[in-house]
Image: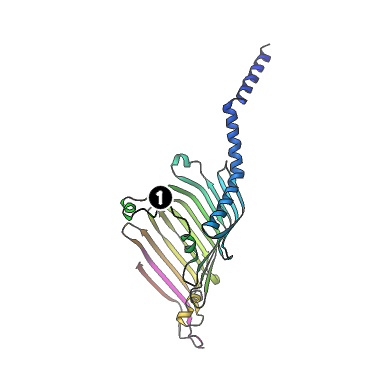
Amino acid sequence: MDAPKNKHLRRHWLMRILLSKAFLFSVALMITYTLAGFFLAPYLIKRQSKQFAQESLKCLVVMEEVRVNPYALTVDIKNFNLKKRDGSPLLAFKEIFINFEISSLWRRAWTFADVRLEGPVVNLQIEPEGRINFIDIADRIPRKEDEGNTSLQEKTEGEVRPPSVIFEHIALNQGRLVFTDQSGPTPGSITLETIGLELKNLTTLPDKKGVYSFEAALPQGGKLTGAGDVSLHPLWSEGSVKVDGFKTVSAWEFLQDEILLDKPGGEVDLEARYRFADTDKSPSFVIEGLKVLVSNLELKARGDLEPIDSLHGHHSSRRRPI
């Protein structure tokens, strides 16, 4: 007799819980959060990005796919393309993946476990009138109304603290940078391929250091690598840079109208350590242990058959503050 009665009581209490206002509110809240995260957030990201690009930046933006996972706290954007209204390319990437950490709630800092950027392409260009294309874009970004009214004294009275942000891991894979100078009579262009960059523990928290490493393929077979430490607050970095097999003709592309030489032969290897610090007094940049090796350099005046100078295996080393 007791078993059916207990079963009836359990069913009774279960129905009361399921029909209670608190439970129904929790279910409604969970459904709303799920729908907003998976469906509304991607729509808003696309819509607001296009609107901001068109109205503020005077550019066009395309995002093929936007995915948001409100439970894993991730955002995944694929095939992004930002270009001028005339179709000139500015910035594109195959994918960006951002993983936000729930630990931000108790760490008192916006924390990102992972930020990955796949296949970015940046087209940096000096326009015929001498302006850099990205500076023009940056100048169009709306400023806060009260920013222009803030006096210099108010800005310098106290230190302006950046928002607290922690990036546990940032990776840039298979990047490409195209730099074009159209300000001279003869346009010049150089491309860095397969750019890779990795940063760990990059943060705006005071006196915290992160580490970085990067590499890139230079035109015609050269290579650029580097590694070191970096801080955002204060702005500081120290590390090493190495260039292997930089072809002198790459520099000639931009200087040919001034130096009046035919395409030179030869290549340059370079290695150095650097230290940069942006202090209250003034920024400082110091290069130490600079080693330069110039191989098979050959210079000819434009139209001449014989070289005016040649240099094989010249090496130099120095320390230079800037």
Task: Tell whether position 229 is magenta.
Answer: no
Q: Position of residue 127 (x, y in %)?
A: 50, 70
Rendered residue at 51%/43% (across/down): 101
Q: Position of residue 66 (x, y in %)?
A: 60, 50
Rendered residue at 34%/54% (across/down): 151
* Residue wearing tag 1: 162
Q: Is residue 25 visible?
A: yes
Magenta extent: 285-307
* Nearer the observer, 225 or 79: 79
**Where the C terminus falls, by quadrant?**
bottom left
* Nearer the observer, 294 or 95: 95
Q: Amino acid at mark 1?
A: Pro
Task: Tell whether position 289 is magenta.
Answer: yes
Q: Position of residue 164 (x, y in %)?
A: 43, 47
Q: Which residue is most to the top? A: 1
Q: Main secondary structure of the magenta part?
A: strand
Crowding at mark 1 (Cα within 10 Å: few <14, some 14-19, many 20+): few
Q: Position of residue 315 (x, y in %)?
A: 42, 74
**In the figure, 88 relative to 314: above or below?**
above
Q: Secondary structure at mark 1?
A: loop
